[in-house]
Image: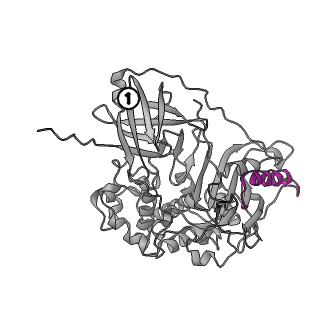
Amino acid sequence: MRRLLSVTVALNVALLAGPRVAAQSAPPDAFAGAAAAIRSEMAKAGIPGAAVAVVVGDRVVWAQGFGLANVETGTPVTADTLFQIGSVTKSVTAAAVLAAARDGVVALDRPVSTDVSGLVPCVGQPTLRQLLSHTAGLIDEPAEFGPQGEDGLAAYPRTWTSEYCLLAPGRAFSYSNSGFALAGLALQEAAKTPFADAVRTRVLAPLGMTRTTFRPTEAMTWPLAVGHRRGMDGTFEVVRPLANDARLWPAGTLYSSANEMARFVLALMNDGRVEGRQVLPAGVAAAMSSTVARVPATGQAYGQGLFLSGDDLRVGHGGAMTGYAAEFDIEDWRRIPGGGMRGREQPIGIVVMTNADGANPRPLLRAALTGTPYELITIGDGGPLPERVLTEREADRFVGRYANPRRFTVEVVREGASLVLKRFGRTFPMRAFQPVDTRPGIPPDQFVVDLPNGGAEAITFGIGPDGRADYLHMNVWALARVASTPSPRRR
């Protein structure tokens, strides 16, 4: 198995209304090769429209739109076109909560029930820091279509039962849209203003992100890329209606443009400064990009609203909604050769937005650096892991059913001394590996399953006080062991 670590970013910058960030310091044709490579990747994937931007140091050096915002109208994408950015929203939400914490409006390390009343005890127990780092122990909620009224955000967490409590707070990283919704509600309650307005006050307005909004009825007043998915004949068709669930706004569905997200990336890269002005409180970016938890199955880490690569050189976040996919990535150590951009090391950021369901923005991100003045530094992954053979007693520790109730339920069974993972109607033999990562937050028991379409996926376990696994970690989710129901006794 080779550990493949990847965190991506969506970068697309153009001139903005309000304070302007101009693309500078690159020759006019410096990104011609990148533009051609992006068009090629879009053609391969059949992506109708995309927007890309590149930020170097404290400047936007390139931003451009590609393709169509709507295949029915033929409207072209520009760097000012709004897209839904999915879970990239979490980075903006985290920045708003952390900015409010700097001003004493919220506290990061007290139970969220301090700010939000009416929660069942286990839902109210996690802290804001745990909610923003996916260590609160709450289940994940993948809903994209739901109530449109903004009052839903306040009402919904107060209906959650103890089913939403997957693991004890702080026990493990487990990606949770529900957790971010609750963090957003805490900001709303503490600020005594609607969540969308609190984010605008803390982040969007200071950064000059004048068009970025949670509200669909505002987004539609600006040039907007509609989402697309493939129809029965294989061609892309417009998604109707737009995905929207106001209960989960803090976790996703923010609308933004490449130009405006570039301003956010600039702030993250420069400790909250854009164009020499302190637009986010100093220290917010550092808090977001400081490791709080490790993601054992992927080798990544997570701060507060940001994924970090295993080498801690890259940070960013991806997101997808029905009809859209977006990512942004900040590379701390990209080397700019002596012939371009003054030949010194500077951080580089990339933003990519697309309007195709299931699109992978990563090829576009890589293409954004093709034929440009920039050189990518490749970090080795450490090579294959050493395998080991389990005894039957060791294997028994992992046997059981595991669930993240609104996401997945899987089963691990024993075949001799070997383990088999049952999920999605398939069985996957599990190969055990010697522990190679002993850092805090990484469970020592690491396995791999080979995927039908090639490649492999890591599976790890957390061990409880009784010596048996109490959760399974798969991708970015923890699945808690489901207590087995005793068979009825025969009379």
Q: In which quarter of the image is the C terminus?
A: top left
In the image, residue 430 lies at what x, y percent?
A: 47, 30
Mark 1 element type: strand
Front residue of 351/164: it is: 164
Residue positioned most to the left? 491
Q: In which quarter of the image is residue 227?
A: bottom right
Q: Nearer the viewer, residue 83 or 441?
A: 83
In this picture, residue 128 sits left or right of residue 56? left
Tell me which amino acid carries mark 1: Arg
Residue 243 seen by the camera: yes
Q: Residue at x 63, y 76 (%)?
A: 220
Residue 406: x percent and y percent? 41, 54
Q: Which residue is drawn at 33% across and 64% down?
A: 114
Q: Which residue does the numbered mark 1 point to in the structure image?
A: 414
Colour treatment of the image: one colour
Whether residue 65 appears in magenta in the rendering, the answer is: no
Q: Residue 37, how many percent across, how many down?
A: 80, 50
Query: Residue at image x 41%, y 36%?
Result: 461
The reply, left or right, for residue 118 in relation to residue 368 is left
Stretch of the chain drawn in magenta: 25-49
The answer to whether residue 440 of the structure is visible from this angle is no
